[in-house]
Image: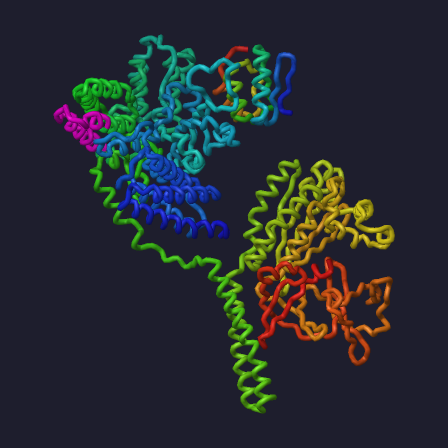
Amino acid sequence: MNPLLQEFLLEARDFLQGISEKLMALESAPDDAGLMNELFRLVHTLKGNSGLFDFPALTRVLHAAEDLMDAVRAGQVAYSTALADTLLEAMDFVAALLDEIEATGALTAEHATEAQAQAHALRALIPPTSPQEEGADGGTTQAQLASGPYALPAFPPLAELPEAVRMAAWQAAAPEVPLHGIVYVPAADSFFKGEDPFHQARHIPGLVWGRARHEGPWPALGELDCYRSELIFEAIARAPSAELIEYFRYVPDQVRIEPLPLIALVIPQGQLNGGPVYGDFVAEALAMLEAGDLAGLKSASEALLELSAAELWVSSALRWLKLLIETAPQQRQAMRRLIEALNTLTAPDWQAEDWQQVPDAPSEHEVATAEQVAPADEDRALLDAILAAQAEVLAQPDGVDWLPGRLKATAAVLRAVLSHLNDSPAALDLALEQSLAEKRSQPLAQWLAAYRERLLGQPLVAVKAASALSLPAPEPGPHTPADRPVPATAAAPRAEPVAEVRAMRPAEESAVSKVLKVDQAKIDRLMNLIGEMVVAKNGLPYLASRAEQQYGMRELAREIKAQYAVINRIAEEMQDAIMQVRMLPVSFIFQRFPRLVRDISRKLGKEVELVLEGEETEADKTIIEALAEPLIHIVRNSLDHGLEPPDVRRALGKPPVGRIILRAQQESDRVILEVCDDGKGIDAAIVKRKAYEKGLIDEARLERLSDEEAIQLIFQPGFSTAEQVSDLSGRGVGMDVVRSVVEKIGGTVSLTSRVGQGTTIRLALPLSMAVTNVMIIESHRQIFGVPMDSVIETVRLPRAAIRQIKQQKAAVLRGRIVPLASLNELLGIAAEPQANADDEFAVLVLRVSGVPVGLLVDQFREVIDVILKPLPGVLSKLTQYSGTALLGDGSVLMVINPQELFR
Amino acid sequence: MSLTFADNRVVLADYVTVEEAESLLEWLLAHPQASLDLSALKHLHAANLQVLMAAGNPVSAWPADPDLAAWLRASLPTQEK
C-alpha cells in the first residue's frame, strides 16, 4: 500500500477517535464553543485529507459532516443528541470504509449508495434557511432524508421516445442484464471542474440510446453562458445498476438511474384513423395465438402491415407484435393484449393489475423484480401506517404554541411519502400554507384524507416502481443492506433502527492499532541517551588499559574487555534500532513529484514521463526532509532547461516524450539519489565561456579545464545569479543552493552530462546523521576530528616534495597539483607543522567543493564513530567547526567542517 | 484548430474542446444563418453541445461517427435544412 495512504489511514483513525471524544464531551457541555471549533477542525481536516485519495464515498460523507459542523458552529443548528447520533453513525461508517481501504486498498462502488444516504442524513440536519422549528419530532429530518435523491427530474415518459429507439432498446435487452433509464444533470459548474459531461454520457456502459436536452426554452443566444452547464442528459443503457452506479460514482447526486420495465417500451404510436377492417384480423390473430401458431400470426401481421400506411397507429402496433413474436415468443399474454388493443386503438395498459398477476407469462421485467413484490406489499402497509399516523397528529386539537412546527413536521413526512411515490407535492404545499395561515390543521387534514383515498384506490405498481429505484435509499446506519426498501426507514418507529445501529457500533470491537505514534522529541531523547551510552561504553577500553598498565591486573583487563564486547554489541544494536525508527522511505518525497512534473511540464508545454525507481530505499528522517527542496530544484531545472519541447525532440530524432528518472538506491552507508533526464545536456564550452565572462575563472584556467570539470562550474554561487542562465544549455538556477544544502547534511553532489543525451545529477547522502564517522588528527598537541566523508586519502610527503608557489604551498600528487594548507595556519595556531622522524609531513587530502586540497597536520590517529553535537550558543558562530563529540576518555573532540575551513 | 469558419458555414472536426465553446458561440451569434458541417467530428465538449443546442443552426452534414450522430440527431433541435 502507498505509504501516504497508510499515513492517512493512521491519522484518520486518530481523527475519528478525536471526533467521538469531542462529541462525547459536547454531550455534557453543549455550549462549549472551543470544543465545537475543535470538532469542526477535526472533521474539516479529515475531509481535506481524504480528498487526496480516490475515495469519493468517503469524502462525500465527510463533506456533509463538515457542512453540518459548520452550521452548528455558526449557530444555525443547535447541538442535540440526535445530531451527535447522526454524526457518530456517519463516523462509524467512515471507520468501516477505512477498514475496507486498509484491507483491500480500495473501495467498492456499492458504498456510494450508503455514503449518499449518510451524507443526506447529515445534510438533513442543516436547515435550509431559518433555524429548525421547535416541536418538530424529528420528522423533518426523516422527510428531507427521503426526499433528497429525488430532486432530479424523472426519466421522461417512454412514449416521448421514438419508436425506433424503443425497439432498439427492446432488442438490446437481455434477461440477465436489465435496462436502465438514466437522467444525468451535470452540476452547473462542471465545465470549470474540467469535466466533460457529454463525454461521460457517451461512454455510459451498455448505452443503447441517449440525448441531451434543456429544461424549457433556451435563453437568447446572446445571453447564453456557454461555460455554465444547463444540459440534461437522458440515456437508456443495458447494464446492471451496480455498474452504472460505479460509472457515475463521482457524481451520484447528479444522476438518477431507474430500471426500465421492458414491457413498458411497447407503446404503439401513430395516427388513429384506422378502419373496422381490423376486427377480423383481431379475431383471427387471437385464434392463431391460442393455437400457438406464431408463424401464422407473424405472416398475417406482416401481410396486414404491408397493407397499412407506416405512420398509422395500427402499423406501429403490428410492428411491435412482429418484434414480440420474433424476439420473445413466450410472451403470449403480451401479444394477446397487443392484438386486443387493435380493437380499441389504445395502448395496452401494462401497469394494470391483471397484467401483473398473469401467472403463466411472466415478463422479463417481472422476473427481475419478482423479489420486490413482497416488499411492495409491505410498503403499502407501511405507507398506510404513516399516513394514518399523520392523520392522527392532525386530528389533535389546534390552538397550541407548537402548531406550526407540528404542521410542518407532518407536511415534511407527507412530502417524503409523495416523493417516494413520485407524486408532485404542489397540492400538499398549498394545503400546508393554508393551514399555517389559518393556524389550524384542517386544510392539511382534508388534503391528507383525499390523498389517502386516492392512494388506496391506486394499483400497487407505482409503489413497486418506486421501490425498485436503484437510487440511494436513506439508510439509518452503515450495516443495513442497501436494497432495503425506502419506506421501512421512513416509517419505522424512530427509536428502533437507532438502537439497532448502536448495538453494532464498533466501539467495543475496535481493532487494536499496531502502529504507535510517537513524538519526535521522545525519539530524539532516546537517541541522545544512546549516544551517551556509546560514549560511556567507549570508556571501557581505557579502563581496561589502565587496569593493565597502572595496576598490573591483566586478568581484570581481559574481563573488562570481554564485558566491553558484549556491551558494545548491544549498544550498536540499540543504535541501529533507533535509527530504524527514524528511517523514512524516499517515497515520502518522491510522491510529490508526479504531480509537480505534470504541472510544470504542462506549463512549459513539454511532454514528460517521470520514472520513479527505488522508492522503498530508506534514510533518516532529517535527511529525507532536507532533500525535498534540492530535489525539487533539480527536477525543475531538468524540466525547464534540460528537456527540449516535443517538436525539437522530434526534429532531433528523439521520442517526443522526455523522460526523467528519479532513482534512489543504497550503497553501503550512503543513499544515492539520481535525477537523470534525456534532454540536451550541458555544453561545457558554453559553461566555460560564461564562467570566464562572469570572472569566476581566469583565462589560464579556462584553457586548462576539462569538460568534466567545466560543467561542475554550474555549482559556483556566482554562476547561478546570471540572468542568461536559461539561454544556457544547462541548469544553473540555484545549483549552488542545492549543493550547499546537500553538503550541510553531509552529502555530495556530482553531475555528469553529455551534450544531446542528457544530464544526470547524483546526490550521495549519509543514511543517517546521527553517527558521524570521523578521523582524528593531531596538530600542535591538540586533536581534531575530520569527517571521513570529505577525506580522500592520507599521504606522507617528504619535505622536498612540498613546493612553495608564491605564498601558497603545493605538491604534486598522482600527477596533479594539489594546493596545501597547514591546519595550524588556518586555525591561527602559531606553530609550524611537525614532520616525523623521516622528515615527512602528514597530509590529509580532502575534497572541498569537489576539488582536492591537502591539509598539513602533525599526526593521523584512528577513525571513530562519534555522536556529533552542534556547537552550543555563541560558539555556533564558529562555522569552521561542525560540532563537538565526546570521546571515550571524557575529552572533547572538535570536529572540523572542511568546507568552511577553506572558505 | 478543430473549428473552421467559412462564409456561412462552420466546420467542426475531430475533437472540439471546452476552450473553443466561446469562439463558437460568438461566431454563431454573428452568423445566425450559418450551417453546421459535423461530418468529421469525433467528439465535442458538452459546452459546445450546449451552444449548438441553444443556437439551433441547421446541420448540413451529420457526423460520420454513427454513435455521435445518433446523440446529436436526438439532441439538436430538428430543423429542415
In-front residue for pair A214/A225: A225
Q: Is residue B31 above or below residue A899?
A: above
Number of labels in the image equals: 0
Judge left or right: residue A431 versus residue A720. left
> Which residue is drawn at the image coordinates 26% and 41% (left, top)?
A81
- Residue numbers of the magenta segment: A379-408
Q: Within the magenta stretch, is there residue A387?
A: yes
> Which residue is drawn at the image coordinates 87% and 53% (left, top)?
A700
In-front residue for pair A36/A869: A869
Residue A677 location in percent, x, y? Answer: 69, 47
Q: Is residue A804 visible?
A: yes
Q: Quadrant of residue A241?
A: top left
Q: Is residue A879 above or below residue A422?
A: below
Residue A719 location in percent, x, y? Answer: 75, 47
Q: How is the image coloured?
A: rainbow
Q: Quadrant of residue A537?
A: bottom right
In-front residue for pair A642/B36: A642
Q: Examine the residues drawn in magenta and state their main secondary structure.
A: helix
> Which residue is drawn at the image coordinates 55% and 48% (left, top)?
A591
Judge left or right: residue B37 versus residue A261. right
Judge left or right: residue B64 versus residue A518. right
Q: Is residue A815 above or below residue A480?
A: below
Judge left or right: residue A53 versus residue B19. left
Q: Quadrant of residue A283?
A: top left
> Which residue is drawn at the image coordinates 65% and 44% (left, top)?
A636
Q: Within the magenta stretch, is there residue A407?
A: yes
